[in-house]
Amino acid sequence: MQAKLGGLHDSRMIFGVAILSLAILAAVFAPAISSGKPSAQHDVVATRFLSPLSTDPRGDFHPLGTDRLGRDVWARLVYGARISLGIGLLAMSMSVILGLAVGGVAGVWRGRLGLALMGLTDFALALPRVVLLLLLAALWQPNAALVIVVLGVTGWMTVARLVHAEARSIVARPFVEAAVALGAPRRRLLWKHVLPNALTPVIAAAALGVGNAIMLEAGLSFLGLGVQPPTPSWGSMIASGRDALVNAPWIAAAPGVALVLVVVACTLLGDGIRDTLDKRVTSEQ
């Protein structure tokens, strides 16, 4: 019982859950906690490069200042959280689904099919992901849907190898051998035994993968190959503020700090989940 509850007292998990909860709440309630107009521009000359905690001539308060076009940085930050977090979660969900399918089938259907699927996985792992992302993003008009698909189809390989290893271990257990002896088809073994038992380590890998996907999306948007302006995303906000680091550092600092905190929170949460699961397995043994 103590091993099962140990994760609740892990400071890394507490920090990760707290930061991610704040980021998700800010994204969900963005219209209520901001001006609700992340792309609004008024008198650019009078409102551009206002420092944090400033009020513009119209009487609007800007807690994180404004950018070169007079747009509210706080509003763009919380609305950008919707894009960055949404893309990271959806892309990782696609990777998990593909990885579960490929790894589970390869672990249950051994022989040529399993060898072919794992060979495909090893080939995809050998490809440099960043170069492939840049190539795919450059071939089509960049948008949020394309970024999700590109990140999803280039991130399933690690999950597939993890599920494959778990599936091979599960298939060799006595209760699965008993099901095979009773004539259970392989599809039933996959859905009833392999995938439910393989989900536990996948959860930890998914938490780590979300942070990686958010970072990659920010990199693509920074290079102009991700979400296109004026739609705010943390990567594009950092890119728009890189030329004003001397006179207006808050433009790039706000999304940069948010990006670092969320990625670190995902990493700590994934590590905490993995250590908790390892302790649970050790206690059960």
Image (spheres, helix red, strand yellow):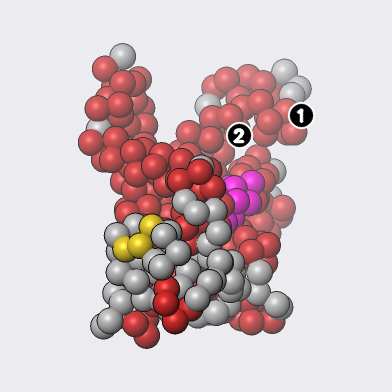
Please determine whether, in this image, residue 196 is positioned above or below residue 230: above
Q: Residue 212 sits in which quadrant?
A: bottom left
Q: Nearer the viewer, residue 107 or 227?
A: 227
Instruction: Tell me if residue 112 can be seen.
Output: yes
Question: Horizontal and vertical percent for residue 30?
Answer: 51, 48
Task: Magenta stretch: give its range.
Answer: 87-97
Q: Which residue is mark 2?
A: 195
Q: Secondary structure at mark 1?
A: loop
Please determine whether, in this image, residue 89 is positioned above or below residue 71: above
Q: Return the mark for residue 185.
A: 1
Q: Residue at the spot x=54%, y=53% of the render?
A: 36
Residue 212 in the magenta stretch? The answer is no
Residue 89 in the magenta stretch? The answer is yes
Q: Residue 176 sits in which quadrant?
A: top right
Could you tell me what secondary structure mostly forms the magenta stretch?
Answer: helix
Query: Which quadrant of the rendered structure holds the N terminus?
Result: top left
Instruction: Tell me if residue 162 can be seen.
Output: no
Q: Residue at the spot x=56%, y=66% of the render?
A: 40
Question: Horizontal and vertical percent for residue 96?
Answer: 58, 47
Q: Residue at the spot x=69%, y=81% of the render?
A: 139
Question: Viewed as shown, does residue 146 lie left or right of 211?
Answer: right
Q: Amino acid at mark 1?
A: Pro
Query: Which quadrant of the rendered structure holds the C terminus?
Result: top left
Q: Residue 37 sits in which quadrant?
A: bottom right
Question: Viewed as shown, does residue 141 lie left or right of 263?
Answer: right
Residue occupying the far top of the picture: 1
Q: Residue at the spot x=29%, y=35% of the render?
A: 14
Q: Nearer the viewer, residue 157 or 32?
A: 32
Gap in angstroms between the C-alphas marked 1 and 2: 15 Å
Q: Nearer the viewer, residue 67 or 267?
A: 67
Q: Amino acid at mark 2?
A: Leu
Pointer 1 or 2: first along the chain: 1
